[in-house]
Each structure stands twice: as C-alpha cells, then as structure tokens.
Amino acid sequence: MFFDVSNLKHKEINDLIRGGGNDVTLSGCLGQRFIAAGMGDINLTIKGTPGNALGAYLNGAVITVEGNAQDAVGDTMNDGKIIIHGNIGDAAGYAMRGGKIFVKGNAGYRAGIHMKAYENKIPVMIIGGCTGSFLGEYQAGGRIIVLGLETKEKRIVGNFPCTGMHGGKMYLRGDCRGITFPDQVNVKEASADDINEIRDDIREFCALFGTEETELMSSPFTLITPDTKNPYKRMYVPN
C-alpha cells in the first residue's frame, strides 16, 4: 500500500501504516517524528526524511529509508530492523535494546547512546561510513560496528567516543591511530574470535548494500570494551 504523507502528522501517518497491510510505502516524509513507533510484523519503506524516534519500541518490523533520517533513529527499538540507504543525524539508536540498524552512510553525534542488552536481546548498529562525536556514549550493551567506507581520509569517529561506556562492545575498522579514548575502556586489535562475533552482521550489511565482504573482513578492526560497570563510582559520596 502506498501513501503520500506530505501534510500529515505522525499520528495520522501511523494510523495509515496500521491499516495498510504488511507492506507499506510512505512518500513525502519530512521530519515527522515517531513513525512506526511500537509496531511489528510489517515491511515499511520510507521515501524522504523521517524525524526523531523512527521505530521507537520497534518489534519485528523491517523499515527501509530511501533518503536521510534525522535524530533518534531506533529509539528503544526491540527486535526490529531499520535499513538506511543514506546518512542519519544525531542520537541514532537511542536506548535501543534489541533489533538492528544498518546505515549505509554516515551518522551524526551520539549514535548508540544508552544502547543496552537484555537477556538474549543483543542490539546491533552498523554504520558504513563515519560518525560524529560521542559515539556509544553511556553504552551499556550490544554491538556498535563502524566500517569507515568512503570517508575520504576523514577519521572514522569524532571526539569523545565511548564516554561513560560500561557495557557492550564497539568495533571500529582500522587501527584508530589519532583517536583519544577515555580511561575507563580497553582498546585492542580485534582477535580472530572477536571478528567471528561480527561476521554475520557484516555479511548482512554487505548483502543489503552491495559491499564486498572479503575486503571488509580482511581489514584489521579495533575492539573497545569497558573496564568497569560503574565508570562514575569515584564521583559518588560513600554512605
């Protein structure tokens, strides 16, 4: 089912999606927030620029964005998948606790902020290009993978990555020379076992966007993990 949502608000859009069957295409999106919030069992294609909190509480849906997406993509998403053929803005994947976000291009500030895992739900965000500052801020679980494709000598990540990180893992392609990480994380070259953990994620990314898997997997990756579950303990007043 096809809908032009150029002049509609988010509630009207979501009502159309819920009544449109299993396959819905939206055109004319321009900054409307909360699209597909809490939905599941649907294939949704968005042509345009959806706004904040796309796929909030997503549960079992597949969303394809043909264009750019703005802030808070995948806000607290749960078991869904968002595929973005372009770039995204700030705070993508805010507090997501399940599902996957695949971004062909670049991400803005604070991608993966407050990402967390719960039991067998492991959220994954793969960014094909580079990211802005504060990547993985307060990350508590899940995997963030940044591939640095077509960045034209630009650093793979901006300033202050992993600030407050206390769970999960981050994989950055390359040796990450010149990037300053906070004291409370461990930074090392990813081992063969570490790479095997993300092999299926990268294979899926390559299948979605037509990227050469062999070339990516032959590159070195840097693995960042927290060395504490409570990075701000020293700031608390003991009782």
Image: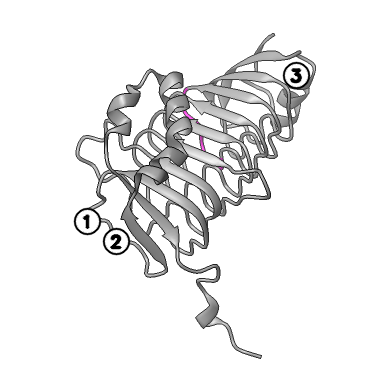
Task: Point out residue 209 in the picture as x, y percentages from the top left corner.
Answer: 41, 20
Question: Which of the labelled discs sits on residue 180, or is there none?
Answer: 2
**Taking 204 as reference, is 4 above or below it?**
above
The N terminus, quarter of image: top right
Name the residue type under label 3: Leu
Left or right of 42? Residue 151 is: left
Left or right of 106? Residue 10 is: right
Residue for badge 3:
16
**Taking 170 as reference, is 152 above or below it?**
above
Residue bounds of the magenta highlight: 67-72
Residue for badge 1:
178
Please state the total of marks drawn on the protein image: 3
**Whole-number angstrom distance, CA of label 2 to CA of label 1:** 6 Å
Asked whether 51 or 37 is in front, the reply is 37
| Residue in the picture at 48% in, 61% down | 165
Contact? badges 3 and 2 (CB < 8 Å): no
Q: Is residue 131 visible?
A: no
Which residue reaches farthest left?
153
**Camera-side mark, 3 or 2:** 2
Of the two numbered discs 1 and 3 on the same chain, state the one appearing first in sequence.
3
Asked whether 57 or 27 is in front, the reply is 57
